[in-house]
Amino acid sequence: MTHTTISAAFAIPQLLRGTARIFPLHSALLQLKYSALCSCTMNGIMKSKKKTDHLARTANNFRQEVISPAKVCGITNESETVKRLRLAVTNKDFTFKAGQWVDFFIPEVAIVGGFSICSSPGLLEQDGVLELAVKHTVHPPAHWIHTQCSLDSEVALRVGGNFFFDPQPADSPVNLVLIAGGVGINPLFSILLHVADFHRNQESEKNGYKMGTVKLYYSAKNTSELLFKNNIFGLMNEFPGKITCSFHVTQQSSQICEELQPYITEGRISEKELEKHVFKDTLWYICGPPPMIESISKLLENFGVPTDCIYFEKWW
């Protein structure tokens, strides 16, 4: 994703348009808070004076106009530090593409959160729900999710983001390589679930998009921080050869359990692993800490991968 330098002072009021329809009392607080940000800028590394300012960091990204009320209908612990929320959305105009994020409006919190959606568009279409997986931090929206959010809590959502996979029926088949670091798995897991939906529908929809293969490389500190691993194992078993995954851990201090050992590599994702996927019909999606993205993007370019085949999302 490429970001041009802009002034947040001009962008923020535009981003907040429509919040009064959802939270009229808190809209004024949001306007006052963000009108003070006169010197924030963004570039390819997403620098800003306020690291946690989601609206400022994403001011030049695509955003939908619609802001939709949502209600929390499920909360589970995805790991010791990550909560997985399920949110019910009744607004039929609310849609998203696999890989996108939401602005997350909380009535009693003035700061707007930004979280990647980790469920598939198909789940929203069928059941009217979407999912987020949020790591615990001191950032007010994430802190609220971990300390105050409960079933039936009401929030509001707005979809945004230029990082997504949304092929159309007439598009040529492609293979995907997804590379995730830490909680950067969220948008890539959404894409992985979307790919699974394509595979399930291929037999019944003769004119639908013909999906290629997907390889996921997923790196985290240790096995307890590998989110969605049971779901990913399920997809690998359901679509052998079509969906494959290599898990990596970089700071594992305990013994890896026997059932995980065949799938786990200790150490970082290697150049040799990635180089074997360099083909002209392959698209690369990367999400994780900026140093990881910059290193892998440069590596892929050195391999001769065209820049228009490399997509990335920087959140930190």
Image: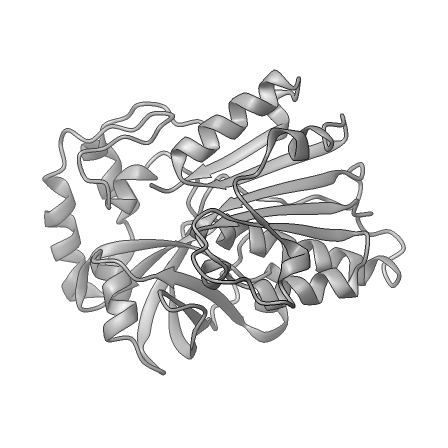
Q: Is residue 7 above or below residue 289?
A: above
Q: Nearer the viewer, residue 162 or 306?
A: 306
Q: Quadrant of residue 177?
A: top right
Taking the spot 17% from the left edge, 34% from the top edge, the residue there is 49
Judge whether 120 appears above or below 211 on screen.
below
User: Residue 18: x, y in percent?
Assistant: 29, 55
Name the residue: 66% across, 30% down: 272
Residue at 84% from the left image edge and 57% from the top image edge: 202
Residue 288 x %, y %: 45, 42
Left or right of 130? Residue 37 is left
In this picture, is 216 found above or below 72? above
Give the x, y percent position of residue 87: 44, 72
Q: Nearer the viewer, residue 251 or 139?
A: 251
Residue 277 location in percent, x, y? 72, 33
On the picture, is 118 further left or further right than 238? left
Is residue 101 visible from the viewing direction of this image? Answer: yes
Q: Which residue is drawn at the image coordinates 26% and 65% (left, top)?
A: 106
Q: How is the image coloured?
A: one colour
Quarter of the picture containing the C terminus is top left
From the viewer's perspective, tell me whether residue 21 is left or right of residue 118: left
